[in-house]
Image (cartoon, helix red, strand yellow):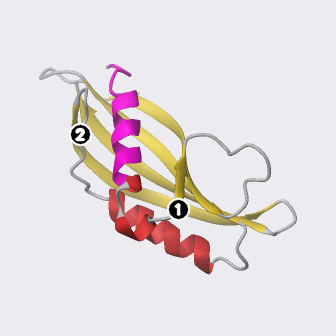
Amino acid sequence: MSYGAAAALQAAIYGRLTETATLAGVSVLDAMPSGSGTGTFVLIGPEDVIDQSDKTGGGAEHRLTVAVISDAAGFQAAKDVAVAVSDALIDAPLALTRGNLVGLRFLKAKARRLDTGLTRRIDLSFRARVED
């Protein structure tokens, strides 16, 4: 098992999301913006990595979260962006600079209100299988 492809996987996901036409104008970040963080944006978030090596070679399963955060009224704006993220990533043919992506699948989503209910957050969980 190796964590070696983690940075390459994140870079490929970032590239895919920033090049997706339905996400034009939506910021894609890997850290919360400083200051107020207003508007609607995509946040590439945490991941858990599990060894998936076998006798044919090394590999890992990356369980990662991509969040959509929005201060727009209601959930509709956040859900529209979440759908675009999901559509862009499921089975995406991502080219990694290290390792080989075998598959990228949707696992689950969780939508909720934050703070005083003025901000919405949708966490999309994905499973990526990478071979070394």
Q: What residue sits right under mark 2 in the picture?
A: 101
Q: Position of residue 11 (x, y in %)?
A: 38, 37
Say above or below: 114 vs 12: below
Residue at 35%, 36% in the rendered image: 9
User: In the rendered structure, does residue 7 fall within the stretch colored magenta?
Assistant: yes
- Left or right: 63 in relation to 77: left
Residue at 41%, 54% in the rendered image: 18
Q: Position of residue 22 (x, y in %)?
A: 40, 70
Q: What residue sits right under mark 1 in the picture?
A: 26
User: CA–CA distance between discs 2 and 1?
Assistant: 25 Å
Say above or below: 76 vs 98: below
Say above or below: 114 vs 29: below
- Left or right: 91 in relation to 109: left
Q: Residue furthest left?
A: 56
Q: What amino acid does circle 2 point to?
A: Leu
Q: What amino acid does circle 1 point to?
A: Val
Residue at 60%, 76% in the rendered image: 77
Residue at 44%, 42% in the rendered image: 63
Q: Which residues are magenta?
A: 2-16
